[in-house]
Amino acid sequence: MAGKIIEISDSTFDQEVLKSDVPVLVDFWAPWCGPCRAIAPVVDELANEYADKLKVAKCNVDDNPKTPSRYGIRAIPTLIIFKGGNVSEQITGAVAKSQIAAAVDKAMG
C-alpha cells in the first residue's frame, strides 16, 4: 500500500473511510482549485511517509457533493482525518506540511 492515494466517491466513502482499520486522511478538493493543486504534492509526500499507518484518499467535491455536505465542508481544500469512523482532525486551506503531519500524528496518538 506504499504511498498509494485512492479516489473515493459518495458511494465508496463509508466502505473506504468509515470502515477503515487505520486512520484515513481525506483530501476534499476540486480540479479548478489552485490551493488544492498547491497542497497535492504535500498530500502525496504524507501518503508515502505514513504508508503503513495511514490511508490517504481524495474526494472531488464537484463529482461527489453528498459527502462534503455531510461534513459541512464550505471551503476547499479541506483535509479531514477520520479515525474509527469519526472525525479526528480537520484542516481547511493550503497549510504547511508540518501542520498536516502534526494533525496526523495527533490522530494516531
Image (cartoon, rainbow, N blue to C red):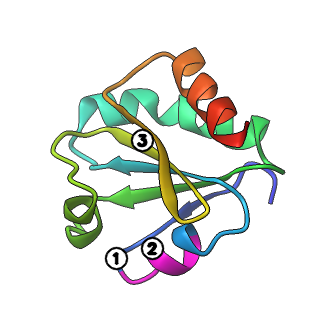
Residue drawn at (29%, 67%) of the image? 67
Identify the residue shown where x is 69% and y is 31%: 105
Dot 1: within a 10 Å radius of its alpha carbon, few (fewer than 14), some, or many (20 or more) residues? some
Q: Which residue is mark 2?
A: 13
Residue type, numbered disc 1: Asp
Which element is circle 3 on?
strand
Magenta stretch: helix, strand or loop mostly = helix
Say which of 45 and 104 sits in front. 104
Judge left or right: residue 105 versus residue 26.
right
Q: Which residue is mark 1?
A: 10
The residue shown at (22%, 49%) is: 73
Q: CA distance from mark 2 to mark 3?
A: 14 Å
Q: Are marks 2 and 1 in contact (CB under 8 Å)?
A: yes
Residue 77 drawn above or below residue 4: above
Please indicate, yes or no, whether residue 15 appears anywhere in the rendered image.
Answer: yes
Question: What amino acid type should be assigned to the residue bearing mark 2?
Answer: Phe
Residue at (34% x, 76% y) in the render: 10
Q: How many marks?
A: 3
Q: Give the distance between the C-alpha atoms of the residues marked 2 and 1, in whole angstroms.
A: 5 Å
Magenta highlight range: 11-16
According to the image, label 3 marks what residue? 79
Residue 71 drawn at (x, y percent): 28, 57
User: Which sits earlier in the primary sequence, circle 1 or circle 3?
Assistant: 1
